[in-house]
Image (cartoon, helix red, strand yellow):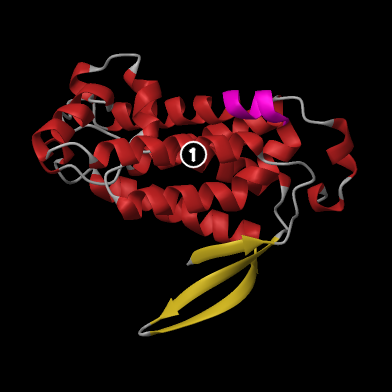
C-alpha cells in the first residue's frame, strides 16, 4: 500500500520537513557524481557500520541513500506525514525529534546485528519515527492509498491507524525473519531501524511538549 496524501492540512509551512528533503536530495545528487569505488568508500565512511561504529555516523548515515527509489520512497513518506508532526511539535523540537528517531533506529539495528560490516544508510529510521508520532496524534486521519491487486491498482481512503499499524507489523516480522539470514555478508533492508525509529517516535511524541493550540484540533481527538 502506497500513501498518496492525507486529509489533515498543516496550519503552518513545513519549513523543516522541506529543508530535510532538500538536504537529502542535494547529498544524493553529490553521490551521483562519484565513481562506484568512490561511492563504496563514501558509504563505508559516512554510513553506520555496526562492527566499527563511529558516533558521527549515526547522524551522517540518515542523509545517504542507495538509489533513486530509496530516496523517493523515503522523501515521499516524509512529505505525507512530516508536515503534520512538525505542525504539532514546532520546528525546533521537530528537528531534534527527527534526528533522535534516526539515531534510535540505527542503534536498534546495531543491537540486532552488531557484527555486520555492511554500511546502514538512509532516513528510514527517522521517518519511521515521524510515522509513529503521526499514529498517536492523527490516528483517524484519512490516507488516500494506492493499493495493488495483481496487475491492477485502485485507490482507497483508509484510516491512518490501519495503514501505520500494518506497516509497523510488516517491518517487525520482516526484521525477525531477517535474523535467520546473514546480513553481515549479504546486506539488505534495515528492518529493525524502522522498528526502533517508529517506537522512539511514539515515545517522544508522548513526552515532548506540543503546541497548546493543537490540542483543540478535532484531528487529535481519539
Q: Residue furthest front?
A: 33
Find residue 49 and report its horizontal and vertical position in percent. Answer: 22, 25
Number of residue marks: 1
Residue 129 visible here? yes
Please tell me which residue is depicted at 86% across the width and 52% down the height of the picture.
218
Whole-percent x, y for residue 9 in the image: 75, 54
* SS class, disc 1: helix
Q: Residue 204 sits in which quadrant?
A: top right
How would you rate the neighbour count of disc 1 (Cα within 10 Å): few for under 14, some for 14-19, many for 20 or more? few
Residue 93 among those drawn in magenta: yes
Residue 123 in view (yes/no): no
Question: Circle 1 is placed at which residue position?
Answer: 22
**Left/right of residue 76 with respect to residue 187 in the rendered view:** right
Indicate left or right for 148 with 211 as reference.
left
Q: Position of residue 111 (x, y in %)?
A: 31, 26
Q: Main secondary structure of the magenta part?
A: helix
| Location of residue 163 with respect to 205 vertically, above or below | below
The residue depicted at 90 percent of the width and 43 percent of the height is 216
Compared to residue 141, the image places residue 100 above or below, namely above
Q: Nearer the viewer, residue 123 or 116?
A: 123
From the viewer's side, name the closer residue of 43 and 220: 43
Comparing 11 with 218, the one in front is 11
- Residue at the location (56% across, 60% down)? 163
Q: Position of residue 19 (x, y in %)?
A: 55, 35
Q: Is residue 158 magenta?
A: no
Q: Which residues are magenta?
A: 90-96
Q: Quadrant of residue 96?
A: top right
Amino acid at each position: 500500500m502506497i500513501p498518496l496524501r492525507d486529509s489533515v492540512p498543516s496550519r503552518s509551512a513545513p519549513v523543516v520537513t522541506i529543508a530535510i528533503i532538500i538536504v537529502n536530495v542535494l547529498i544524493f545528487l553529490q553521490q551521483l557524481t562519484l565513481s562506484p569505488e568512490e561511492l563504496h568508500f563514501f558509504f563505508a565512511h559516512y554510513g553506520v557500520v555496526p562492527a566499527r561504529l563511529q558516533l558521527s555516523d549515526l547522524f551522517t548515515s540518515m542523509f545517504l541513500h542507495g538509489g533513486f527509489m530509496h530516496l523517493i520512497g523515503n522523501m515521499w513518506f516524509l512529505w505525507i506525514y512530516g508536515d503534520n508532526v512538525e505542525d504539532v511539535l514546532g520546528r525546533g523540537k521537530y528537528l531534534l525529534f527527527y534526528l533522535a528517531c534516526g539515531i534510535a533506529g540505527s542503534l536498534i539495528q546495531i543491537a540486532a546485528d552488531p557484527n555486520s560490516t555492511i554500511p546502514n544508510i538512509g532516513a528510514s529510521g527517522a521517518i519511521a519515527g515521524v510515522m509513529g508520532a503521526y499514529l498517536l496524534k492523527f490516528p483517524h486521519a484519512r490516507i488516500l492509498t494506492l493499493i495493488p491487486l495483481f496487475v491492477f491498482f485502485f485507490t482507497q481512503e483508509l484510516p491512518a491507524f490501519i495503514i501505520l499499524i500494518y506497516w509497523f507489523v510488516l517491518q517487525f516480522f520482516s526484521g525477525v525473519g531477517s535474523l535467520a539470514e546473514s546480513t553481515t555478508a549479504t546486506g539488505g533492508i534495515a528492518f529493525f531501524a524502522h522498528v526502533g525509529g517508529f517506537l522512539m517516535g511514539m515515545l517522544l511524541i508522548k513526552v515532548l511538549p506540543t503546541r497548546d493550540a493543537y490540542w483543540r484540533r478535532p484531528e487529535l481527538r481519539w
